Amino acid sequence: MSTTATRTTSGPARRRDQRGPGTVRPGSPRPAAATTATRTPTPTPTPTRRGPLPPHVLFAERLLAVLSGERPVHWMLGQTVAEAYDQLIALAPTTPLRARGARPVIRRCGGFPLRPGVVEAFASIAAGEQVRAMAFRLEQGTDRKWRCAAVELGGRRH
Protein backbone atom coordinates (compact mmCIF):
# COMPACT_ATOMS: atom_id res chain seq x y z
CA MET A 1 0.00 0.00 0.00
CA SER A 2 1.20 3.47 -0.89
CA THR A 3 1.76 6.07 1.79
CA THR A 4 1.44 9.05 -0.55
CA ALA A 5 -1.84 10.96 -0.68
CA THR A 6 -3.75 11.08 -3.93
CA ARG A 7 -5.61 14.12 -5.24
CA THR A 8 -9.35 13.76 -5.10
CA THR A 9 -10.20 16.80 -7.25
CA SER A 10 -9.90 16.94 -10.98
CA GLY A 11 -8.34 19.76 -12.99
CA PRO A 12 -5.09 21.68 -12.76
CA ALA A 13 -3.55 22.80 -9.53
CA ARG A 14 -4.45 26.32 -8.41
CA ARG A 15 -2.03 29.25 -8.56
CA ARG A 16 -0.59 30.26 -5.23
CA ASP A 17 0.88 33.64 -6.17
CA GLN A 18 -1.25 36.68 -6.98
CA ARG A 19 0.77 37.96 -9.94
CA GLY A 20 -0.74 37.86 -13.41
CA PRO A 21 0.60 35.97 -16.39
CA GLY A 22 3.86 37.17 -17.86
CA THR A 23 5.36 38.38 -14.59
CA VAL A 24 8.69 37.11 -13.43
CA ARG A 25 9.14 35.51 -10.03
CA PRO A 26 11.67 37.17 -7.76
CA GLY A 27 15.00 35.34 -8.02
CA SER A 28 14.22 33.63 -11.31
CA PRO A 29 16.27 34.44 -14.39
CA ARG A 30 14.84 37.14 -16.65
CA PRO A 31 14.09 36.29 -20.28
CA ALA A 32 16.53 37.62 -22.84
CA ALA A 33 15.46 40.91 -24.40
CA ALA A 34 14.48 40.68 -28.03
CA THR A 35 16.74 42.56 -30.37
CA THR A 36 15.41 44.85 -33.04
CA ALA A 37 16.90 42.59 -35.70
CA THR A 38 14.69 39.66 -34.66
CA ARG A 39 11.47 41.65 -34.22
CA THR A 40 9.08 41.84 -37.10
CA PRO A 41 7.14 45.08 -37.43
CA THR A 42 3.41 44.88 -37.00
CA PRO A 43 1.67 46.09 -40.15
CA THR A 44 -0.63 49.03 -39.58
CA PRO A 45 -3.95 48.87 -41.36
CA THR A 46 -4.42 51.51 -44.01
CA PRO A 47 -7.70 53.38 -43.88
CA THR A 48 -9.98 52.60 -46.80
CA ARG A 49 -11.96 55.83 -46.58
CA ARG A 50 -10.98 59.25 -45.38
CA GLY A 51 -14.50 60.44 -44.68
CA PRO A 52 -18.00 60.47 -46.08
CA LEU A 53 -18.36 60.30 -49.85
CA PRO A 54 -19.49 63.45 -51.65
CA PRO A 55 -23.21 63.49 -52.51
CA HIS A 56 -22.67 63.21 -56.26
CA VAL A 57 -20.74 59.94 -55.80
CA LEU A 58 -23.47 58.50 -53.55
CA PHE A 59 -26.18 59.45 -56.03
CA ALA A 60 -24.23 58.03 -58.96
CA GLU A 61 -24.18 54.67 -57.14
CA ARG A 62 -27.90 54.92 -56.36
CA LEU A 63 -28.86 55.85 -59.91
CA LEU A 64 -26.69 53.04 -61.26
CA ALA A 65 -28.48 50.55 -59.01
CA VAL A 66 -31.88 51.66 -60.33
CA LEU A 67 -30.91 51.97 -64.00
CA SER A 68 -29.19 48.57 -64.02
CA GLY A 69 -32.22 46.84 -62.54
CA GLU A 70 -30.54 46.02 -59.25
CA ARG A 71 -33.03 48.19 -57.30
CA PRO A 72 -36.62 49.21 -58.08
CA VAL A 73 -37.45 52.81 -58.99
CA HIS A 74 -39.45 53.39 -55.81
CA TRP A 75 -36.17 52.93 -53.88
CA MET A 76 -35.41 56.52 -54.98
CA LEU A 77 -38.62 57.99 -53.51
CA GLY A 78 -37.68 60.83 -51.20
CA GLN A 79 -34.28 61.10 -52.89
CA THR A 80 -35.60 62.68 -56.10
CA VAL A 81 -37.81 65.61 -57.00
CA ALA A 82 -40.93 64.93 -59.07
CA GLU A 83 -39.40 65.58 -62.51
CA ALA A 84 -36.39 63.31 -61.89
CA TYR A 85 -38.60 60.57 -60.50
CA ASP A 86 -40.70 60.70 -63.70
CA GLN A 87 -37.47 60.45 -65.72
CA LEU A 88 -36.43 57.36 -63.75
CA ILE A 89 -39.87 55.79 -64.30
CA ALA A 90 -39.42 56.26 -68.05
CA LEU A 91 -35.82 54.95 -68.09
CA ALA A 92 -35.87 52.07 -65.61
CA PRO A 93 -38.05 49.51 -67.46
CA THR A 94 -35.47 49.31 -70.24
CA THR A 95 -32.62 48.91 -67.70
CA PRO A 96 -30.30 50.90 -69.98
CA LEU A 97 -27.19 50.32 -67.90
CA ARG A 98 -27.48 46.53 -67.73
CA ALA A 99 -25.07 44.47 -69.83
CA ARG A 100 -25.02 40.74 -70.42
CA GLY A 101 -22.76 38.94 -67.99
CA ALA A 102 -21.03 42.03 -66.61
CA ARG A 103 -22.15 44.07 -63.64
CA PRO A 104 -21.95 47.79 -64.44
CA VAL A 105 -19.51 49.85 -62.39
CA ILE A 106 -18.74 53.54 -62.13
CA ARG A 107 -15.41 54.27 -63.78
CA ARG A 108 -15.31 57.98 -63.11
CA CYS A 109 -17.57 60.43 -61.32
CA GLY A 110 -17.32 64.18 -60.95
CA GLY A 111 -19.39 67.12 -59.86
CA PHE A 112 -19.40 70.87 -60.47
CA PRO A 113 -21.08 73.18 -57.96
CA LEU A 114 -23.15 75.76 -59.86
CA ARG A 115 -24.11 77.70 -56.75
CA PRO A 116 -24.56 76.78 -53.10
CA GLY A 117 -26.93 73.83 -52.89
CA VAL A 118 -26.82 72.87 -56.61
CA VAL A 119 -24.39 70.39 -58.20
CA GLU A 120 -24.21 69.23 -61.82
CA ALA A 121 -22.60 65.78 -61.89
CA PHE A 122 -21.49 63.16 -64.40
CA ALA A 123 -20.45 59.54 -64.30
CA SER A 124 -18.99 57.17 -66.87
CA ILE A 125 -20.31 53.66 -66.40
CA ALA A 126 -18.66 50.54 -67.76
CA ALA A 127 -20.25 47.15 -68.20
CA GLY A 128 -17.95 44.76 -70.00
CA GLU A 129 -16.95 46.42 -73.29
CA GLN A 130 -19.77 48.95 -73.13
CA VAL A 131 -19.23 52.44 -71.66
CA ARG A 132 -22.15 54.81 -71.08
CA ALA A 133 -22.39 58.40 -69.85
CA MET A 134 -24.79 59.60 -67.19
CA ALA A 135 -25.41 63.21 -66.16
CA PHE A 136 -27.55 64.32 -63.25
CA ARG A 137 -28.32 67.37 -61.17
CA LEU A 138 -28.50 67.47 -57.38
CA GLU A 139 -30.26 70.10 -55.31
CA GLN A 140 -30.06 70.55 -51.57
CA GLY A 141 -33.41 71.22 -49.91
CA THR A 142 -34.19 73.39 -46.92
CA ASP A 143 -33.88 70.23 -44.79
CA ARG A 144 -30.18 70.02 -45.92
CA LYS A 145 -30.83 66.72 -47.77
CA TRP A 146 -29.63 66.24 -51.34
CA ARG A 147 -32.14 65.16 -53.98
CA CYS A 148 -31.74 64.29 -57.64
CA ALA A 149 -33.49 66.86 -59.83
CA ALA A 150 -32.66 65.59 -63.36
CA VAL A 151 -31.14 62.55 -65.09
CA GLU A 152 -29.72 62.12 -68.60
CA LEU A 153 -28.17 59.07 -70.22
CA GLY A 154 -25.85 59.21 -73.22
CA GLY A 155 -26.98 62.70 -74.23
CA ARG A 156 -30.65 61.74 -74.41
CA ARG A 157 -32.87 63.43 -71.87
CA HIS A 158 -35.85 61.34 -70.74
Image: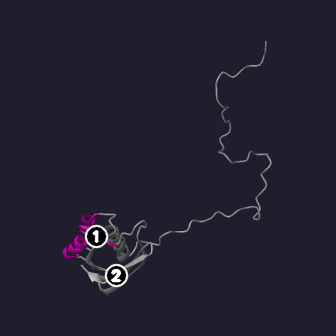
The magenta stretch is: 72-96
Please identify the dominant SS of the magenta region: helix
Left or right: where 12 falls relative to 53 = right
Colouring: one colour
- Kindly identify which residue carries mark 1: 94
Question: Quadrant location of residue 60?
Answer: bottom left
Q: Dot 2: few (<14), some (14–19), or many (≥20) neighbours within 10 Å? A: many
Q: Is residue 144 above or below residue 118?
A: above
The residue furthest front is: 100
For mark 1, give the secondary structure.
helix
Q: How far, Cα to Cα, is label 1 from label 2? A: 23 Å
Residue drawn at (69%, 23%) of the image? 7
Asked whether the viewer can see residue 117, the reply is no
- Kindly identify which residue carries mark 2: 121
Closer to viewer: mark 1 or mark 2: 1
Q: Is residue 37 above or below residue 152?
A: above
Q: How many marks?
A: 2
Q: Is residue 23 above or below residue 149?
A: above
The residue furthest bottom is: 114
Q: Is residue 95 magenta?
A: yes
Q: Position of residue 103 (x, y in %)?
A: 41, 67
Amino acid type of the residue tagged 1 in the rendering? Thr
Residue drawn at (64%, 29%) of the image? 11
Q: Position of residue 30 (x, y in %)?
A: 78, 51
Question: Quadrant location of residue 25?
Answer: top right
Residue drawn at (50%, 69%) of the image? 48
